[in-house]
């Protein structure tokens, strides 16, 4: 058993799995969760790296799921918390089912905010801890045909930078990882309705490199990281390009065809 513990949500695939892998290779034991049975296969692969891994299938889009997961970790001394669980939802806002919209908002915003509140207080009381939140460069632009996802990421990006200022006098670091389009299953899950978006067919960022950039920034106590030069250019231009133009450009990659 290692003397460091990392907790990673949404760790069955994609960025979450890669963050868990890097943490395991860096000497952490793990508690991981996802809302799908694939989390157990991920746990087996992570155990092969020498980590002690606890896996939990839980839906964090509901209060009961968040509470069940918190009950699992509340009494543990956690060195690293990666709030990565989230979903996307494509197609036009008017065509989306309200239950799907609400679930996306609850998962991306409500559970992350609740876990940050609890984990931040827990780590502050302990006197140490690092937190990574997976935001997105989508939070810098209005996102036609991806409107709810981009809006939730704008919330997370803003929340992180606000809390960093509030927490500057406590021994808890908070880093926001803001990747661009990354090659993960998020584009190909049937329930996400993203497979017909042009961006789903284009080359995207390497998920392992994105996770590595986020992990390194977190360990260094950096406030935020945007992996990849093209993505950093997008964030720099976001403050000067008119909102209407940014929306039209986003539409080119997101409108189903």
Image (tube, helix red, strand yellow):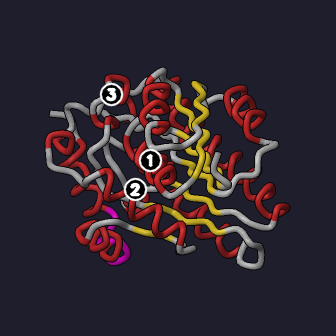
- Return the mark for residue 21: 1
The boundaries of the magenta stretch are: 238-243
In the figure, residue 108 lies in which quadrant?
A: top right
Horizontal arrangement in the rendering, residue 81 relative to residue 49 (left or right): right
Residue 46: image location, x then y, percent: 46, 39
The circle on residue 61 is none
Task: Give me the residue at 56% from left, 51% from top.
Answer: 82
Which residue shows up at 38% across the image and 75% down it?
A: 239
In front of the other: 152 or 38: 38
Q: In which quarter of the image is residue 238?
A: bottom left
**Vertical relation: 69 (above or below) 170:** above
Classify mark 1: helix, strand or loop: helix
Q: Which SS class for mark 3? A: loop
Residue 69 horizontal/vertical position (percent):
69, 33
Seen at 70% across and 52% down, the residue is 78
The span from disc 1 to disc 2 (Cα, nearest Å) is: 9 Å
Give the structural element (helix, strand or loop) at label 2: helix
* Whole-percent x, y for residue 225 in the image: 43, 69
Q: Residue furthest right?
A: 125
Q: Residue 239 colored magenta?
A: yes
Q: Can you tell which of label 3 and label 1 is closer to the viewer?
A: 1
Which residue is under mark 2?
A: 211
Q: Which of marks 2 and 3 is nearer the N terminus?
A: 3
Quadrant holding the N terminus = top right
Discs 1, 2 touching: Cβ within 8 Å = yes
Give the residue at mark 3. 189
Q: Earlier in the sequence, mark 3 or mark 1?
A: 1
């Amino acid at each position: 058993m290692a003397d460091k513990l990392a907790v990673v949500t949404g760790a069955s695939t994609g960025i979450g799995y890669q963050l868990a892998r890097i943490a395991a290779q860096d000497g952490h034991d793990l508690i991981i969760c996802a809302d799908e049975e694939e989390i157990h296969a991920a746990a087996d692969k992570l155990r092969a790296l020498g980590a002690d891994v606890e896996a939990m299938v839980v839906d964090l889009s509901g209060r009961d799921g968040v509470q069940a997961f918190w009950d699992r970790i509340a009494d543990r001394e956690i060195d690293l918390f990666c709030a990565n669980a989230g979903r996307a939802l494509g197609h036009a806002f008017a065509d989306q089912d309200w239950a799907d919209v609400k679930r996306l908002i609850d998962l991306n915003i409500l559970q992350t905010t609740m876990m940050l509140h609890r984990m931040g207080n827990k780590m502050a009381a302990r006197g140490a801890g690092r937190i990574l939140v997976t935001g997105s460069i989508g939070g810098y632009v209005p996102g036609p045909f991806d409107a709810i996802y981009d809006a939730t990421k704008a919330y997370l990006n803003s929340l992180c930078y606000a809390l960093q200022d509030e927490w500057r006098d406590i021994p808890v670091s908070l880093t926001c990882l803001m990747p661009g389009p990354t090659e993960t299953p998020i584009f190909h899950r049937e329930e996400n309705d993203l497979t017909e978006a042009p961006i789903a067919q284009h080359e995207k960022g390497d998920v392992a490199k994105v996770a590595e950039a986020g992990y390194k920034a977190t360990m260094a106590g950096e406030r935020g990281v945007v992996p990849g030069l093209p993505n950093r250019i997008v964030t720099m231009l976001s403050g000067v390009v008119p909102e209407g133009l940014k929306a039209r450009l986003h539409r080119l990659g997101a409108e189903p065809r």
